[in-house]
Amino acid sequence: MRIDVLTTFPEMFAAEPPAALGVSIPARARAAGIVEVVATDIRAYAENKHAKTDDRPFGGGPGMVMMCQPIWDAVRGVEASDPRPAHRVLLTPQGRPLTQAMVERLAGLPRLLVLAGHYEGIDERVIEALAPEEISIGDYVLSGGELAAMVLIDAVVRLLPGALGDQESALAESFSTVAGAGDSPHARLLDCPHFTRPRVWQGREAPEILVSGDHAKVARWRLEQRLARTRDRRPDLLPNDPQPDPQPDPQANPAEPACQPPGRVDSPGTGS
Ligand code: ADE
């Protein structure tokens, strides 16, 4: 998989010296060639004298707005640098909340183009023209989309085949589906508690059943724990919760293919 990130802070995505995506699983996946993360500075595409990427908002008010031209040209230029079609993603608090189901869908694509905005926002016209999938990582506001992009990339990369030492460990954790329960978001449960040596720590004993050697009993206990935790902490994830899923994933079965061909002109006349 190739992941392009468009940002005014490309150094945040470097593998060396290690930043968030230069350690642990993402670093190993990058070194093994499972994923290529290419960060591009939007500033390099700015056509003005001072390589400005933002300007004051029409109508006044605080903050700056990222301009259309550098973003449009950066997206088009980066997309043309590789023949694989790129699925465009914009990280924004206005996007749909990220779920594990969305992460799984994105992990199945050959290429992502992740746009991380900064400042007060991005000129709406370039968002309309690029038509990215808009994703939020939660109902809070970060200083920019870069940290949100890293969250998304980390969640995607660890699902790529070969990224985890033991593929099973990805299947048995929070928000993974329960075998036989289908792929409904309601079939997703929180993880069970985990324990390791010593058996007794500060007077607290690890559950007896986990050292019983009875694998069937351990599996049943873990499922029970997952159900109990989910019922207690996130009842909204359970099938019988009266609240409907507030955010179904409309891209799960898109009417149109999610990928856009490289070099596509979405709005004739607005390209450079
Ligand atoms: N940019 C700023 N805040 C964000 C959020 N919560 N999710 C995604 N992108 C963001």
Image: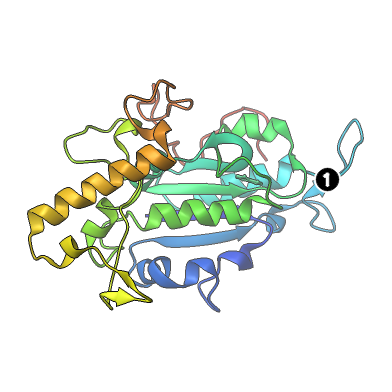
**Residue at image point 21% right, 57% down:** 168
Task: Determine crowd level at label 1: few under 14, some 14-19, many 20+ residues with C-alpha closer than 10 A.
Answer: some
In this view of the protein, which residue sits in the foreground, 56 or 91? Answer: 91
Residue at mark 1: 64
Q: Quadrant of ligand 1?
A: top right
Q: Quadrant of residue 244?
A: top left
* Res 159 → quadrant: bottom left
Q: Position of residue 269 (x, y in %)?
A: 67, 29
Circle 1: element type:
loop
Above or below: residue 158 compared with residue 97: below
**24, 45: nearer the viewer:** 24
The x, y position of residue 178, in whole percent, is: 23, 41
Place of residue 140 in the rendered image (x, y in percent of width and height, measured from the top left): 65, 44
Quarter placement of the N terminus? bottom left
Q: Residue at x 42, y 53 (%)?
A: 155
| Picture quadrant of residue 104 | top left
Residue depicted at 60% across the width and 56% down the height: 147
Residue 258 visible somewhere in the drawing? no
Tell whether 242 sits left or right of 127.
left
**Residue drawn at point x = 68 percent, y = 45 percent:** 141
Q: Residue furthest front?
A: 203
